[in-house]
Image (cartoon, helix red, strand yellow):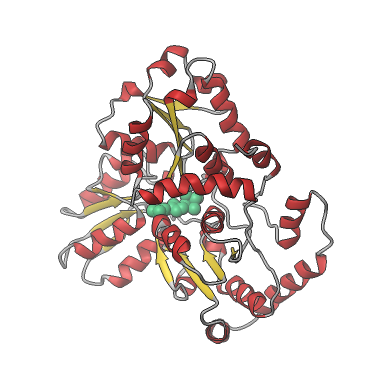
Amino acid sequence: MGDVKAASLAYRPRPCDTYGLAGILTTLTGQPTPLRLTVMSTEALLEQLYDTPETDLIEDIRRIRAELDGQVLILGHHYQREEVFAFADVSGDSLRLSQQAAATHTPYIVFCGVHFMAETADILTSDEQTVILPDPAAGCSMADMADSPQVEACWRELATVIDPDATVTPVTYINSAATLKAFCGEHGGIVCTSSNARRVMEWAWGQRQKILFFPDRHLGENTAVAMGIADEDMIVWDPNQPMGGNSRQAIERARLILWNGFCSVHQLFRPEHVDTMRRAHPGIRVAVHPECSRAVCEKADFIGSTEAIIRDVAAAPAGQAFAIGTELNLVNRLRLQHPDKPVYFLSPMVCMCSTMFRTDPQHLYASLKAIRDSRELNRVVVPPEIKRWGKISLQRMLDLG
Ligand code: 13P
Ligand code: SF4
């Protein structure tokens, strides 16, 4: 068994900070890398692009995209802003995009999404392929709520009560660092997305009596509730408290240990928003993402991943009104795509993923230009030992279909 723990500790990308090629090389070599000129020229280019009229910029992206035909695959998550989403060769939810990354042979993948998605793509592609995240500061606040030292510490604390390697299957939501996917690979665990969480959890309980689910408490809890798991069989693990804030008896009894993480966007939807919508629009169908709290999901008519919500709206008859509890860019797109179905945003507040929004046409153009000029810019590289174990947990998920 390779030393994935040492590799995980050494590899600490800070996805919500800005780091470019210089940052990646510094991470890999441990030495500050004098690449200021590359970084400066990119900044200067971006500044220039922000002064370029948007219509010209869109035309420039089209042109450079055509020049790179066959060399680049642009993947776009459903939460991307419209101007960027329009350039995606393939759009989808996290599962679909990871399946696409695993299947493609193009030399470059430009991932219009967030950092964990680009890391996942790098794990699933060959060493000859290059994965680019147009804005390296596009992280995920939920993914940042669990890191490798915290999960290792949790495993050690569990080991004072039970034998985790014999009794616990670790399951990480794909919205997590590559190091946690590697942890799951090494400990007989698996990755899940919001569209296959139930299938993955059935598999995980088929392996061992208990599941440790991280980092999203809500996805784990909502899926378990739908599977008929009793409240007494679930505990929440708070990484800031000894034993996660649980007694030995509670740990012994639990079938599901839920990490206390959440999505800062989806937590803004509240159960009272569902009541307000139902009062204002009798007959409305409420569709929400499973990253919403249990209280919201229990009041909804439909719970599903972004892809499942899109299918649900498409399948409804004309005239059916919807209140949708997921990120704003997707809800706005659904409204435009279905003028015959009134589509409302579930919350009266703006729930937008600010990190997804970071990828703009300027960063997309800069990424494509760097590829065209054979310059490395904002490449996401997962170190080999983490990649090896991360691939095992991702492949277990992909094999479930
Ligand atoms: P899915 O697109 O897989 O449903 O995930 C939503 C999300 O929050 C991505 O970060
Ligand atoms: Fe992360 Fe939430 Fe944004 Fe998805 S919507 S990328 S979970 S912060």
Q: How many marks?
A: 0
Residue, x 56% and y 58% (percent of image)?
A: 122
Q: Position of residue 110 (x, y in %)?
A: 55, 68
Q: Nearer the viewer, residue 68 or 138?
A: 68
**Picture quadrant where residue 318 is located:** bottom left
Q: Residue 305: percent from the left, percent from the top? A: 34, 52
Q: Is residue 212 at least partly visible in the picture?
A: yes
Q: Nearer the viewer, residue 340 or 10?
A: 10
- The foreground one among 3 and 330 is 3
Judge whether 235 appears above or below 119 on screen: above
Which residue is at the far top? 249
325 w.r.t. 335: above or below: above
Q: Residue at x 53, y 85 (%)?
A: 66
Residue 150 point in image, percent of width and height:
59, 32
Q: Residue at x 34, y 38 (%)?
A: 203
Residue 265 in sight from this viewpoint: no
At a point 41% along the width and 67% down the height, the residue shown is 91
Image quadrant containing the N terminus: top right
From the top left corner, tell me how far across and down residue 401 is, in percent.
Answer: 33, 52
Instruction: Give the side of residue 278 with respect to residue 291, left or right.
Output: left
Which of the 4 image quadrants contains residue 21?
bottom right
| Residue 190 quadrant | top left
